[in-house]
Amino acid sequence: MSDEKKVFGRAEEFLTLFNQGAEFTKELLHENERLRHELLSVQDDHRQAATDPGEWGKLRHELLAQIDQLTQEKDHALERLKMVEAENRQFAGRYVEIEEENNNLANLYVSSYQLHSTLALSEVLKIIIEIVINLIGAEIFAVYVQDERSGTLEVVASEGTEVESFPTIAPGAGIVGGSVVSGETFCGITHGTQDWESPIACIPLRVQDRPIGAIAIYSLLEQKDSFSPLDHELFTLLAGHAATAIFAAQLYSQSERKLNTIQGFIDLLTK
């Protein structure tokens, strides 16, 4: 590029910048003039209000009306805020309840899986005890199993009191025997009792129409004062799973004994 073109290009750039600066200066002057007129108008309004009591009273009345309106809006907003906070507390409480229910159901699922993961009766009874303590919140309770020969209900596991302390119950006798025969869950008073024949709740354990036993609850943990709707759902679920697990463990134990007997008989014949 020749020197003349360079000089000409620089001149055009300078002229462009100069025009832009002039335009910007013109806009600033126009804005300054507008602001000056607005300032004069405000000053005139103040001077008029100061010299005209009627105008000042009108302005004061308008300001007071605006203040009242703003006060009402503030009170309404505060009232709405209180309502929203109350709703948030309700939602938070419900959220906690749902979380607790979900945790209990998840624990029940895990416990049910554990119930059916073993065929050892002692392990099954141990898992049942953990479920009743952790999910239902029972402090003193007993697991009854029906004897196949006599039909009586005998305690095979317990919590809070030794197994030997509980009586043997005949089918249909009292709350426990009646619940096992009818297959209906009993749920009465929730304060503790030492009457082993009158539990506060009794969950019959049945496989289809065959009675297996029952879980009798005599008192709840200190932090729990009543049975919730979720507890009643747990009663139903626990009854089916616990009964099936006990029944399967009993069948397995019987088959093991028979197998050992047959094996012993075969060993005698082959010697």
Image (cartoon, rainbow, N blue to C red):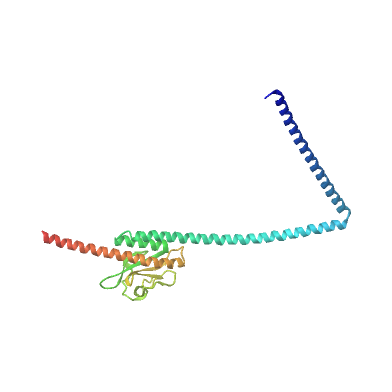
Task: Inspect this view and state whether residue 269 appears.
Answer: yes
Task: Inspect this view and state whether residue 137 appears.
Answer: no
173 or 166, nearer to the observer: 173
Total number of numbered labels? Answer: 0
- Kindly give the residue lying farthest to the right in the view shown: 51
135 or 101, nearer to the observer: 101
- Kindly give the residue lying farthest to the top in the view shown: 3
- The answer to whether 179 appears left or right of 39 in the picture is left
Q: Quadrant of residue 139?
A: bottom left
Q: Is residue 131 above or below residue 149?
A: above
98 or 166, nearer to the observer: 98
208 or 81, nearer to the observer: 208
Q: Residue 210's spot in the image, x, y percent? A: 31, 71
- Kindly give the residue lying farthest to the left in the view shown: 271
Q: Residue 52's spot in the image, x, y percent? A: 88, 55
- Identified at 75% across, 32% down, the residue is 15
Placement of the N terminus among the 4 image quadrants:
top right
Placement of the C terminus among the 4 image quadrants:
bottom left
